Image: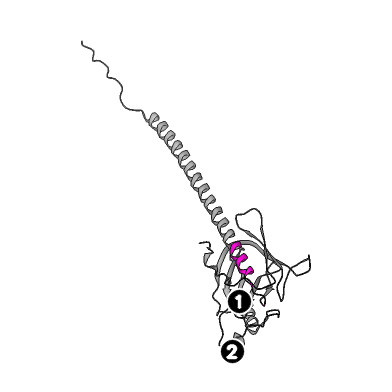
Amino acid sequence: MNARPRSARGGFTLIEMIITLCVFVMLAASVFGIFGATLESAGALQDNQNRQDQVEALAAWLKQSFLALPANGTLVSYHRDGRPFHVSGIIWGAGTDLQALDLQAQANGNYTLRLATCVAASSPDDQASAPAGTDGYSPALARFQTEVFNDDSVLAWRPLMRDLRSVDWRFRVPNSNDWQDTFSSGKPVLTQLTFQPAGMPTSIVDDFWIPPTAPPVGLVLAPAASLTTNP
């Protein structure tokens, strides 16, 4: 009787395949986890950089605009009921060359800093600028204040920076070292903006000097064209 030789074992057993599959799944999960964390970290860094760019652009534009405020210009602040800050916005300029920065509440509890410019009216009296040497108050300023405070539909608001947790202003009057929470007429010598964008651990404080005399020839109120907004 001839014995048949036993053939060599081929392939994997079911247990071996299950173990191999489990090891592959764990390795894949680790790789995807590391990849996802890397993408998340890169996204956070990009968001922080975008916020920093916005902060720098806003500061540069405000500095230029306040430096360009003419000798007969004025700056006023106002407060809206229900806002947790001393100042909800400011208006500055001279004659009909006026701009306003305002806070708009968002659904998530944060705020949007937005900009509006004065729209010329048909009334000749409204077009008149205040004469040099006064506090800069004019019919155009009175009308613009009312439109801004009432959020009139005639105004075209442009968002400058979204998701701000806090925004507030302070003002230092001439011949004084004291800060005021509000300002009603004339020009302060210093304006301080304090704000905290979402995602930043601390508030940002910027001081802006407002010259008491007219700016150099050719220096005009800067449009906010260079400012970028959050998507």
Residue that extends furthest to the front in the rendered view of this protein: 217
Q: Which residue is mark 2?
A: 124
Q: CA distance from mark 1 to mark 2?
A: 17 Å
Percent coordinates x, y for residue 17 in the rendering: 38, 31
Give the camera-side residue of 109 and 74: 74
Q: Quadrant of residue 91?
A: bottom right
Residue that extends furthest to the left in the rendered view of this protein: 1
Task: Say above or below: 25 vs 147.
Answer: above
Q: Which residue is mark 1?
A: 98
Percent coordinates x, y for residue 107 in the rendering: 58, 65
Question: Secondary structure under badge 2?
Answer: helix
**Residue 210: in magenta span:** no
The rendered magenta stretch, by its main secondary structure, is classed as: helix
Circles 1 and 2, Cβ within 8 Å, touching? The answer is no
Q: Which residues are magenta?
A: 59-72
Give the camera-side residue of 150 and 117: 117
